[in-house]
Image (cartoon, helix red, strand yellow):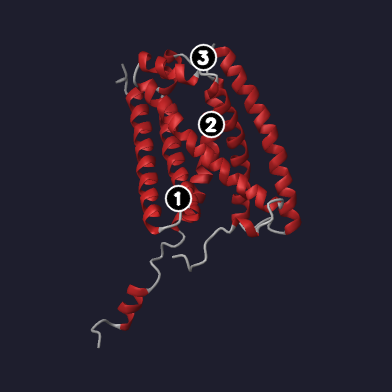
Amino acid sequence: MSTRPLSPHLTVYRMSRYTLATSFFNRVTGVGLSAGLPLLVYWLVSVAGGARAYGQAQRLFGLSLMRLVYAGLVVAFSYHLLAGLRHLVWDTGHALERSQSRRSAYLIVVLSIALMLLLAYGTWRAVVRAS
Amino acid sequence: MSLRSPLGRVLGLGAARQGVRRWWHQRLTALALVPLAIWFVVSLLALPGLDHATVAAWMSQTWTALLLILFVVTAAWHSQLGVREVVEDYVHGAGSKALTMVIVSFAHVLLAAAGVFAVLRVAFGAAP
C-alpha cells in the first residue's frame, strides 16, 4: 500500500493557481452542501411530525449559531452551482483553452458573489417575515 | 487447457463497461439539480411564512411534493457520489476506506428515504 503512488499530493501543487483554487473550492463547497443535507431532511421530517415536532426544529433553526450555517450554505450553494455549470460546459468539450478557462474562472467567482448577495438578501427577508 | 472459448475468456476478463457509470451519474444528477435546487431555494424564500401550517400546506401541493421528492433523492445521490470521491482521495488504507464508504452509503440512503417518507406523509395528509 505504502509503495504505491498516493493521490492527491497536495504539497506538489502551487496553491495560488486559479485552476487549483476554483477546483478545490468546488469540492469544499460540495462537501459543505452534503453537510447541509441532514438539515434539509430534518426540516422535512419535522414538518411531517406535526406542529410540536416542527416547533422543536424551529428552536434549533432559530439559534443564532445557525445564522453562520446559513451564511455558509449560501456561499456553498452559489459557488457550487456556478462551478458545476462550468464543469458541465467543459464536459461538452467547450471552453477548454487556457485563456477561456481563466476567463470562466473569474466569471463564476463574480457571478457567485452576486448570487450570494442576492440569496443573502432573500434569506434575510424570509427570516424577517418569519419572525 | 481451459474449456472456455477465447470469446468467453475475453468477455470474462474485459472491462465491465461500468467504468464511467459514476462519472455519468454525477453529471446527470448535476444537470437535474440545477433546476431542482433553484426551484427549491426560490420557493422556500417566497413562502409567505415559515410556520407549520404554511409549510405543511405548501408541501402537500402535488407539484411541490413531487419536486421535493425528486430534489431530495437527486441531491442525496449527487452528494453520495461527491463524498465517495473525496473519501477515495483522502482516506487511505483499505479497511478504513471500505468502512467509510459503507457509512457514507448508508447515511445517504437513510437521508433520502427519510426525506421521501416525510414529504409523502405530509402530502397524503397523514401528518399529525
Q: Position of residue A8 (x, y in %)?
A: 56, 58
**Left or right: A126, with A58 as reference point:** right
> Distance between the Cα atoms at labels 3 and 2?
17 Å
- For the residue marked with disc 3, what is the amino acid? Gly
Quarter that holds the C terminus of chain A = top right
Contact between marks 2 and 1 (CB within 8 A): the answer is no
Q: Nearer the viewer, residue B124 or B73?
A: B73
Does mark 1 fall on the same chain as mark 2?
yes
**In which quadrant of the rendered view does residue B117 lie?**
top left
Toward the bottom, the furthest residue is B1
Toward the top, the furthest residue is A131
For mark 3, give the secondary structure: loop
Quarter that holds the N terminus of chain A = bottom left
The residue mark sitting in front, 2 or 1, is 1
**Left or right: A30, with B13 as reference point:** right
Residue under pointer 1: B84
Toward the left, the furthest residue is B3
Does residue B111 show up?
yes
Report the chain holding disc 1.
Answer: B
> Distance between the Cα atoms at labels 3 and 1?
37 Å
Does residue A85 show up?
no
**In which quadrant of the rendered view does residue A80 lie?**
top right
- Give neighbour class at mark 1: few <14, some 14-19, many 20+ (Cα, 10 Å): some
The residue mark sitting in front, 3 or 1, is 1
Residue sitting at x 32%, y 83%: B6
